[in-house]
Amino acid sequence: MLVKLTNRQVKLGVIGSPVAHSLSPVIHNYMINELALNYIYLPFDVERGNAKKFLNAASLMGVTGFNVTMPHKQDIFSGVAEALGDALAAGSVNTAVLKCGRWLGYSTDGDGFNLSLLEKGVNVRGKSLLLLGAGGAARAVILSAKKNGAGKIVVLNRTAANAKALADSMGVEYGGLESSRIAAEFARADILVNSTPLGMHGIDQDFMDLSFLSAAPGIVCDLIYNPLRTELLKRAEQKGHVVINGLSMLIYQAILSLELFADMKIGAHEMKSGVEKYLLKNGYIH
Ligand code: NAP
């Protein structure tokens, strides 16, 4: 543990279930230490359905801010006094901050994703996006892409009804996740974003067919960060595409959350590089 425990630290944390695998405590405590802030960041395993109880208990326990992961993002959205910005647009909160006795809800996922593109010199303005998957992460990416002036956006998903629901609510196009459809849309898109868990460690499923990557080089992003280089990213790199892994989004959304918790500006690119090196050196990511 990098942060030395004192009795005067202000508490931050992450709630989820399960939460044991979360990298947020390591990332935040590293940043807290680097910035010499008077915080400590803790994991809180909170069962599904108890998120609103946690919101009340947190202020009593001296917690002034926390991140939210599966399965609580929607419950905290409906529990906070006010949701702002992307959280309001997405109906989902990943960062809750106690201000003047009121819990405010934010979402930093979309801006975190956009910073991961900017780091590689990619500006979404006018670019077309193809998203695979239609869950919460896809929604955050679409919100961010629209906010930053992206062109056409297409969502392909295993369950058509979920693709339609997301596409209709965001005003984008949608379709099924068949290989032929992926290939056709990929050939027309500038940026591909995998927002399914296909290829993730512990999920015994991956893309059946990656031959679509033979199309002209573009940008291929995978929101997965374990492993760092999924089969999709390995093959995309071989075919000459620019590749972006999910660790960048994860770290940038954490930096943006800490900016909200501590009400301060952090040099995002420099901090991201420090966090990434720390995670790699200490074996937190592979
Ligand atoms: P989610 O809300 O549960 O949505 C999952 C999506 O993936 C759904 O569209 C689902 O399709 C699809 N899917 C699930 N299993 C599939 C399979 N076997 N084959 C094809 N499609 C499948 O999850 P989420 O929060 O959006 O997360 C999606 C991915 O993004 C995860 O890998 C997660 O780790 C990653 N993520 C990364 C970050 C980051 O900071 N890097 C942040 C958030 C999420 P159906 O509609 O058919 O069920």
Image (spheres, rainbow, N blue to C red):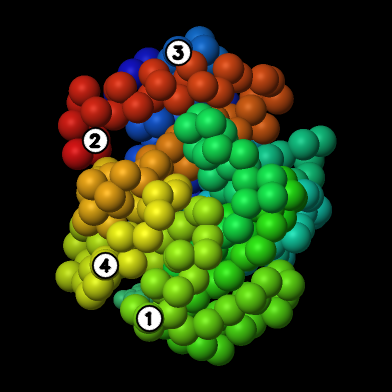
Q: Which residue is mark 1?
A: 180
Q: Dot 1: few (<14), some (14–19), or many (≥20) neighbours within 10 Å?
A: few
Residue 181: x and y in percent read 43, 79
Marks 1 & 4, CB-CB < 8 Å contact: no
Q: Of the residues under marks 2 and 4, which one precedes in the sequence?
A: 4
Label 3: element kind: helix
Within 8 Å: ligand 1 and the Cβ of disc 3?
A: no
Q: Which residue is mark 4?
A: 211
Label 4: element kind: helix
Query: Residue 161 or 279: which is nearer the viewer?
Result: 161
Residue 96: x and y in percent read 65, 46
The amino acid at mark 1 is: Ser
- Mark identifier at residue 284: 2
Marks 2 & 3, CB-CB < 8 Å contact: no
Query: Residue 126 or 103: which is nearer the viewer?
Result: 126
Q: CA separation, marks 1 and 3?
A: 48 Å
Q: CA separation, marks 1 and 4?
A: 10 Å
Label 2: element kind: loop
The amino acid at mark 3 is: Glu
Q: Of the residues under marks 1 and 4, which one precedes in the sequence?
A: 1
Q: Of the residues under marks 2 and 1, which one precedes in the sequence?
A: 1
Task: Judge depth for marks 1 and 3 and give the one in front.
Answer: 1
Q: CA separation, marks 2 and 3?
A: 18 Å
Q: Of the residues under marks 3 and 4, which one precedes in the sequence?
A: 3
Residue 88: x and y in percent read 76, 58
Within 8 Å: ligand 1 and the Cβ of disc 2?
A: no
